[in-house]
Image: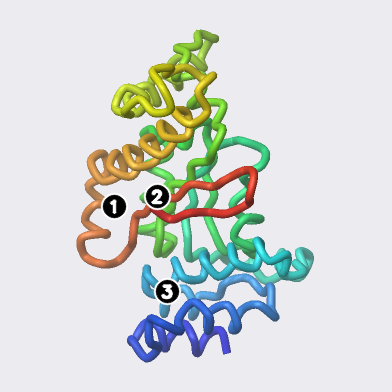
């Protein structure tokens, strides 16, 4: 059923109004990892809908039971992820959990502040161009410690350089909830985190001609999202 759904979506046989619901129904009873046939048949839009359906299950407390030993056995011969999710190292934002994914369903690079550098861009190029991933999600989150550090111009070893990559997003964010632009203003911090996600999305396009061309050709989709650590909800931007 899951393979049939993926093929149907790829050829436009499923109406947009029912796509998310049917995707959820098709995979909610099985936590089997993604297969080569399913990965090839998926469109970027369909891959995004699978993530949204998994997030809905997570929010509803209906996450699937994961048979990890079985998934290890299945993926031992190869991996066919349909998504690449760049997220922060924050311990509360594990993307495999938030989107109810099986082993082998997604590449999940993580770095404080969900920024990109040459190594992460190279990893994304591998994931999309060589390994077949169909969607790249830049996942930021509320109350981000890295964004707070950038707001306060924190100095600490190698962290200083990392926070410097977030600082442009802080500077580009308009003041909200008063004039305070420090980590003490939670509303401003979250606004800056939102800006940081969108700047990271644009940085991917600008700094990776490979990924930009793939997106222009409709082979992949690059999107931003914000996770609310208090509600568990992911908002796609």
- SS for tag 2? strand
**Does the rendering let one see residue 195?**
yes
Q: Estimate the x, y position of residue 127 in percent, counting from the top left.
A: 43, 55
Q: How many other residues sit within 10 Å of disc 2, few (<14), some (14-19) or many (≥20)?
A: many
Q: CA distance from mark 3 to mark 1?
A: 18 Å
- Label whose residue precedes the other's in the sequence (3 or 2): 3
Q: Considering only vertical position in the picture, is 215 above or below 111? A: below
Front-lying residue, 72 or 165:
165
Q: How many marks?
A: 3
Residue shown at the point (49%, 80%) measured from the top left: 37
Does residue 100 appear left or right of residue 83 in this picture? right
Task: Say which residue appears at 47% left-offset and 37% top-offset.
Answer: 114
Q: Work out whether residue 167 or residue 176 is closer to the camera in this orientation and state it.
A: 176
Which residue corresponds to mark 1? 211
Report the residue marked by disc 2: 224
Q: Upstream in the sequence, badge 3 or badge 1?
A: 3
Query: Distance between the Cα atoms at labels 2 and 1?
Result: 15 Å
Q: Nearer the viewer, mark 2 or mark 1?
A: 2
153 relative position to 168: left or right: right
Where residue 214 appears, x then y in whole percent?
Answer: 26, 59
- Do the numbered discs 2 and 1 sit on residues whose CB atoms are within 8 Å? no
State yes or no: discs 3 and 1 in contact (Cβ < 8 Å): no
Q: Position of residue 182 (x, y in %)?
A: 47, 17
**173 or 115: nearer the viewer:** 173
Label 1 sits on a secondary structure element that is helix
Q: Which residue is mark 3?
A: 46
Q: Is residue 63 left or right of residue 188?
A: right
Task: Indicate which label's residue lies in the foreground, 3 or 1.
Answer: 3
Look at 34% across and 87% down and name the residue there.
11
In terms of image quadrants, where is residue 151?
top left
Q: CA distance from mark 3 to mark 2?
A: 16 Å
């Amino acid at each position: 059923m899951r393979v049939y759904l993926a093929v149907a979506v790829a050829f436009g046989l499923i109406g947009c109004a029912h796509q998310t619901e049917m995707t959820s129904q098709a995979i909610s009873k099985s936590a089997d990892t993604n297969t080569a046939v399913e990965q090839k048949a998926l469109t970027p839009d369909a891959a995004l809908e699978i993530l949204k359906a998994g997030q809905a299950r997570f929010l509803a407390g209906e996450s699937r039971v994961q048979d990890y030993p079985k998934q290890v056995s299945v993926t031992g011969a190869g991996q066919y992820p349909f998504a690449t999710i760049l997220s922060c190292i924050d311990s509360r934002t594990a993307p495999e959990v938030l989107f109810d994914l099986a082993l082998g369903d997604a590449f999940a690079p993580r770095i404080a502040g969900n920024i990109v550098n040459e190594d992460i861009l190279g990893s994304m190029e591998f994931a999309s161009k060589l390994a077949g991933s169909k969607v790249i999600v830049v996942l930021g989150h509320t109350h981000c410690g890295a964004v707070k550090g950038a707001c306060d111009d924190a100095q600490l070893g190698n962290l200083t350089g990392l926070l410097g990559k977030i600082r442009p997003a802080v500077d580009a964010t308009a003041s909200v909830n008063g004039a305070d632009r420090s980590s003490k203003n939670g509303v401003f911090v979250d606004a800056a985190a939102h800006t940081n996600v969108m700047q990271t999305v644009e940085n991917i396009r600008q700094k990776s001609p490979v990924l930009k061309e793939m997106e222009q050709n409709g082979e992949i989709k690059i999107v931003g999202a914000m996770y609310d650590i208090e509600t568990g909800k992911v908002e796609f931007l």
